[in-house]
Every structure is written in C-alpha cells, then in structure tokens.
Amino acid sequence: MRTTPKILGLLVLAIGILPVTAQNNAGSQKVSFYSAEQVKKAFGIDPASPNGTNGVLGELLDSKKNPMFKGASSYKVTVRRKERKQDPEFHKTKIHIFYVLEGNATLVTGGKMSGKAAGVDEGDTVKFPGQTVAGGETFALDKGSIIVIPAGAVHWFKDIPGKPWLAFNVELF
C-alpha cells in the first residue's frame, strides 16, 4: 500500500530525541502505541478532505503538538525478526518506531527491573540480561500496529507467541 510509507515517514519526521539522566527515570518516558485498528482507521478517507485523502486521520503523532519530542539528528531504517523473548533494555539516545508486519508479541514498557543493569554497550543501550520487569505497561504488538518507544523507556519483549514476529523499524538518534 503506497500510503504506508507516507505515514511511517511522518512518524520519522515527528519524533525526536529525549534526554535521559538516570536509570531510575528509565521508565518515566511515555510510549505511544497504535493498535492495528487505529492504524487501519488512519488510512481511511477524512470527510473534511476535498480530494479524498486521509488528511489529518493519517497524523498519528506530531512532535509540534507534543513538547516531549525534539528534532532527531540521525536515523536508521531496519526490519526486525524475533522468535523468542528478549531481555529488558533501554536506550539512552535511541527511539524505536515499530510497525508490525507479521506475527504478534507481548511487549512490556516501564516498570522495575528484577536486578541491576549489566552495563552500557557502544550503542548507548543499557541491558538487563536474564531479568524480567515488574509492573509497567503491557502492549499486544499485532500485525498492523505501531509503537513508538522513546529514548529512556525500558522495553521488554516478554513473549513472542506468533513466531516469527516481523516489524519495520525506524531508529532515531
């Protein structure tokens, strides 16, 4: 569908880098989630649009209307494949935007880690190997859904029941 790249492009332009000052604040960043149904509705025709486009219906997130976001300086476009759970982590400077293409996953954001961090890798990722997350917010990442995980937000792929889970991913730095 030709409209999909336009919406994803708008998301890339709309998101910026959020500063993270301490590990204890890692769960305080707001995650933006759009269910497959919300994304499907965003492709609809806006009744106020004179030329039959999706108009403002396609605008899922606008950094100009959300003061938490600033302009991004660089980005990377990837595709992701997951077939098993992943340890919790957060990125000090990287924002993830996932658009689910296939499968489903249970993702937990925020909450409290069951132990201490293993350190920070060269990509500014703080990892929590072998740990789980208590509390937080749980999202069902199904085909067609979009989630925006800002820098500093702990995220944990708790379960991947719909193997494989495939997603289009934009990383903003």
Image: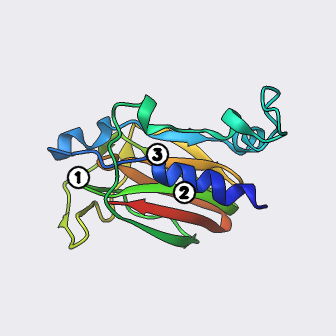
Using the image as rendered, state which of residue 114 and residue 82 is in the foreground.
82
Q: Which residue is drawn at 83% across and 39% down?
A: 51
- Is 13 placed above or below 139 here? below
Specify few, some or many for label 2: CA neighbours under 10 Å numbering under 14, 14-19, or 20 or more: many
Name the residue tied to disc 3. 14
State which mark lies toward you, 3 or 2: 3
What is the x, y in percent for residue 28?
30, 35
- Is 44 placed above or below 173 here? above
Query: Which mark is first along the chain, 2 or 3?
Result: 3
What is the x, y in percent for residue 105?
60, 56
Query: Quarter holding the C terminus?
Result: bottom left
Question: What kind of residue is marked 3?
Answer: Ala
Name the residue tied to disc 1. 115
Query: Which mark is first along the chain, 3 or 1?
Result: 3
Name the residue tied to disc 2. 98
Query: Which mark is first along the chain, 1 or 2?
Result: 2
Question: What kind of residue is marked 1?
Answer: Gly
